[in-house]
Amino acid sequence: MAGHSHSHFHSHNHGHPHEQSHHHGETQNREYFNQQASTYDSKHQKTLDQLVEEIRKRVGFIGVDWADEETSDEEGGEKDEKKEKREVRLLDYACGTGLVSRALAPYTTQCVGIDLSENMAATYNARAANQGLTPQEMLAHTGNLCLPESSPSYQSQTGLFSAPDFFNFDIAAICLGFHHFDHPDLAAKRLAERLKPGSGVLMILDFLPHEKMDSSHPASETVIHHGFSQEQIHKIFEQAGVGKDFGFEELAVVFNRATETTPKFKRKIFMARGTRAEFNTINSS
Ligand SMILES: C[S@@+](CC[C@H](N)C(=O)[O-])C[C@H]1O[C@@H](n2cnc3c(N)ncnc32)[C@H](O)[C@@H]1O
């Protein structure tokens, strides 16, 4: 596999600080997660299962008007026809194999995934198909919505996601993606633009501030940020226009990992949520 690497991008990566290049994170992330895709679920199964549980425990905190909630018995038994589910659409950004989509599928009517890694998107789609879901219900695409406008691929990437199907979401989520991005603030803005004005919710799950990862760890090149504080995240939400009803909670799950060559580390995970304002008061500059 390594024998015929066609990457031209490796040559300039020796010891340069991460912030030097817009594409540092992109190239490293795509390669790393393309390699990880087939083993990601089995390797992290326990943590992923816990996260699904933690997300579902907080559907009230997330605060979307979900498609299917137990509370609908207030309506009484008068209505003869089975009620149509309200349409609730999720954008699962940096979706990986689909953790957030799986967690929220019972509460939504459509899950749209986007991931930089084509192998991750393919794994997501294979899982959805195995569950008997249609592409209309759950489908991932390969792409990057976090590029700065100065990036050569900005236009083509934006073009891929310009159809109405990629807008007006009830919720956009990024789970464990933020720390891999060159520009998390830009990611928040790009997702906020795709939410329903006045009600759409941005949800971020990521690490609280933690120690730097040992540089021998195979993922260390992909980790651009070593966690986020509540203040940092709140500011990012405000600046993206999704600061309304901001909420921040620490989850009862700890990310634990060790490999044969790297020491064990523990990280705490937070969940943040905020609602998009009705009118865009954000300076577009
Ligand atoms: C740790 S995984 C998390 C996957 C999934 N959300 C989960 O919680 O299991 C991080 C994912 O972010 C994706 N990623 C990294 N940078 C990205 C970018 N700029 N745009 C989209 N996806 C990105 C990676 O390909 C990878 O699938």
Image (cartoon, rainbow, N blue to C red):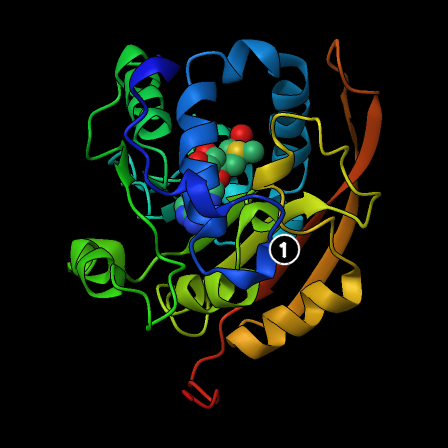
Rendered position, 191 above or below 266 = below
Q: Position of residue 18 (x, y in %)?
A: 59, 54
Q: Quadrant of residue 137?
A: top left
Q: How many marks?
A: 1
Q: Locate the N terminus by quadrant.
A: top left
Q: From what the image shows, is residue 40 above or below residue 176? A: above
Q: Where is residue 16 shown, x and y percent of the image? A: 60, 52
Q: Amino acid at mark 1?
A: Pro
Residue at 62% over, 19% down: 49
51 or 36: nearer the viewer: 36
SS at circle 1: loop
Q: Residue at x 39, y 26 (%)?
A: 34
Does any portion of residue 68 appear in the rendered image? no
Whether residue 48 is visible, yes or no, is yes
Q: Would residue 35 be found to the left or right of residue 157 on screen?
A: right
State the residue at coordinates (80%, 35%).
267
Residue of label 1: 17
Towards the viewer: 264 or 59: 264
Image quarter where the C terminus lies is bottom left
Q: Badge 1: how crowded within 10 Å, few (<14), some, or many (20+)?
A: few
Residue 43: % across, % down: 59, 12
- Tell me which corner region of the image, top left, top right, bottom left or bottom right, holds residue 250: top right
